[in-house]
Image (cartoon, rainbow, N blue to C red):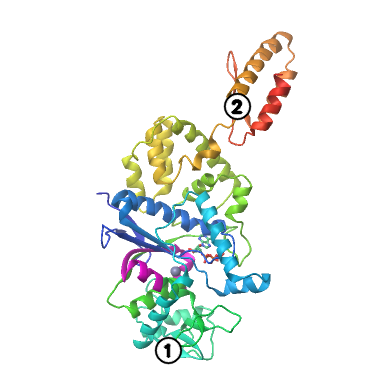
């Protein structure tokens, strides 16, 4: 069996991955808060963990991997959005989740095994909060329930911070009812205008961190294999998840291995909604950038390194993918090249994997190219629609023949103006015009519009 090694953020080392139960490999990844379109940064963890999901399915079998990605559909950002827009909360979260699915599907991400919505697991959260109170790790104050951070000795172990540094460094909100400034909210009261659920502490709603602890436990158990998310979630979100889960159920180990993707940057800063320096996946798709191209660009940098998006990267990716599709289309899908599996098993070396695909394409090995690219979620039939030759073959043949004759004539008369005009019009329409020794051949590009091609044919070769 393939040996997978992954960098564990907790130990900062590449570790041998040994699942608790190879018959059911379990992974949890923090998902979106649904109040707005996903930006390109939000897509990075989706694509990265999708590749890990594909690798795990390849190694352990598709039916032996459980992937959970939650949906945060109760949150003060959602409440604020509803208040400012006058819209119903449920309408906002439903619509945003639908958009999320459309956009992530367009990037070729497989749907996780389970996508629990926080609002459907409030009971599990209330139960876990109750356990934390019973065990002395949480307390009720002014209608809130707070986690007593100093009651958990290992707090800070994941991010390598000491509690005292956190107090000095973090801008923690110091509510008067907190025993300690670091204590964080598990439950808060809701006034009648806000979403709320009955609880032993009155009508209220959960804090964000408890969601992931309660839902991962409900769907994956007290111990599971991998917990993932963006590096920006390492502190405090993941630190808090660990504290809650370990304190409520010390008999379980919670997540064994932590993986964090580095950030997608814009001018050196994290792309984020709060900084306003973002564009959405939908913006790119609407500009005609195929989802497969976005995916390729995201995978061309190792997940552990920061990266940025440039239009030049996208153009280059599009040209490469277009060529690869031409090669792959003519071959059946073979098994992935063994080196492909080894590269991904080495801490998801996606950049190395892309280099291997270049090699396979160079060798013209369409079957290995297809089979190997599938592990990265590239060159699939659905994903590759954009690269299909769209233009009408007969029209192209007629045009090419007319141009070949025109070139013979132009050489005799030394008047190349007609030929040059036709060539320019075709190039502008995205059709590459190649002149060989004895013929003109035409090669439509990904963006060639069939209607425009018909117009040109009518003009040039009536
Ligand atoms: N610039 C980025 N690069 C990579 N991953 C990111 C980036 N911004 C957010 N993420 C990740 O996206 C996922 C979804 O997070 P979430 O929906 O909470 O985003 P968000 O916090 O609303 O985004 P923002 O930080 O823009 O407010 C998380 O795993 C988070 O780490
Ligand atoms: Zn989480």
Q: Nearer the viewer, mark 1 or mark 2?
A: 2
Q: CA distance from mark 1 to mark 2?
A: 71 Å
Where residue 207 appears, x then y in whole percent?
49, 78
> Position of 268 compared to 12: left or right?
right
How many numbered marks have been drawn onto this rendered protein structure? Answer: 2
Where residue 437 appears, x then y in whole percent?
58, 14
Residue 139 - label: 1
The magenta stretch is: 214-236
Where residue 363 appears, x then y in whole percent?
40, 30
Q: Nearer the viewer, residue 46 or 95?
A: 95
Where residue 86 appears, x then y in whole percent?
67, 71
Identify the image quadrant of the C terminus.
Answer: top right
Residue under the image location 49 percent in, 42 percent down: 382
Q: Secondary structure at mark 2?
A: loop
Q: Nearer the viewer, residue 343 or 80?
A: 80
Camera sees residue 86: yes
Residue 292 - label: none
Q: Nearer the viewer, residue 334 or 260?
A: 334
Circle 2 residue: 392
Q: In the image, is residue 380 above or below residue 255?
A: above
Q: Say which label, 1 or 2, has the lower sequence index.
A: 1
Crowd band around label 2 with a 10 angstrom C-alpha radius: few (<14), some (14–19), many (20+): few
Q: Nearer the viewer, residue 122 or 6?
A: 122
Residue under the image location 55 percent in, 65 percent down: 34
Residue under the image location 46 percent in, 71 percent down: 120
């Amino acid at each position: 069996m393939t040996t997978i090694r992954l960098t564990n953020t907790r130990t900062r080392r590449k570790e041998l991955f040994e699942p608790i139960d190879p018959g059911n490999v379990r992974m949890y990844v923090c998902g979106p808060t649904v109040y707005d379109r996903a930006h390109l940064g939000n897509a990075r963890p989706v694509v990265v963990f999708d590749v890990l999901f594909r690798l795990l399915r390849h190694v352990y079998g598709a039916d032996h991997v459980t992937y959970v990605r939650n949906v945060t559909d109760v949150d003060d950002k959602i409440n604020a959005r509803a208040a400012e827009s006058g819209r119903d909360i449920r309408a906002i979260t439903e619509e945003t989740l639908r958009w999320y699915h459309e956009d992530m599907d367009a990037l070729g991400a497989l749907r996780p095994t389970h996508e629990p919505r926080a609002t459907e697991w409030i009971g599990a959260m209330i139960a876990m909060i109750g356990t934390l109170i019973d065990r002395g790790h949480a307390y009720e104050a002014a209608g809130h329930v707070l986690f007593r951070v100093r009651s958990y000795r290992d707090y800070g172990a994941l991010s390598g911070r000491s509690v005292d540094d956190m107090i000095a460094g973090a801008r923690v909100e110091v509510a008067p009812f907190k025993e300690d400034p670091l204590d964080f909210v598990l439950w808060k009261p809701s006034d009648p205008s806000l979403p709320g659920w009955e609880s032993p502490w009155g009508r209220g709603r959960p804090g964000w961190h408890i969601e992931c602890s309660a839902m991962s436990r409900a769907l994956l158990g007290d111990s599971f294999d991998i917990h993932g998310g963006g590096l920006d979630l390492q502190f405090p979100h993941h630190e808090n998840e660990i504290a809650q889960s370990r304190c409520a159920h010390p008999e379980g180990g919670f997540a064994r291995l932590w993986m964090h993707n580095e950030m997608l940057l814009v001018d050196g800063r994290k792309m984020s909604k709060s900084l306003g320096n973002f564009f959405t996946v939908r913006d790119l798709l609407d500009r005609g950038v195929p989802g497969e191209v976005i995916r390729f660009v995201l995978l061309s940098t190792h997940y552990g390194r920061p990266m940025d998006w440039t239009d030049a990267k996208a153009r280059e990716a599009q040209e490469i993918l277009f060529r690869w599709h031409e090669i792959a289309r003519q071959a059946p899908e073979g098994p992935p090249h063994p080196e492909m599996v080894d590269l991904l098993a080495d801490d998801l070396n996606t950049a190395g994997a892309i280099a291997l695909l270049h090699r396979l394409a160079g060798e013209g090995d369409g079957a290995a190219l297809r089979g190997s690219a599938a592990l990265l979620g590239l060159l699939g039939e659905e994903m590759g629609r954009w690269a299909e030759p769209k233009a009408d073959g007969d029209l192209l043949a007629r045009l090419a023949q007319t141009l070949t004759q025109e070139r013979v004539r132009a050489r005799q008369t030394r008047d190349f103006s007609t030929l040059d005009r036709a060539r320019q019009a075709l190039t502008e329409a995205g059709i590459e015009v190649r002149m060989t020794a004895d013929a003109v051949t035409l090669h439509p590009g990904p963006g060639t519009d069939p209607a425009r091609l018909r117009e040109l044919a009518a003009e040039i070769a009536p």
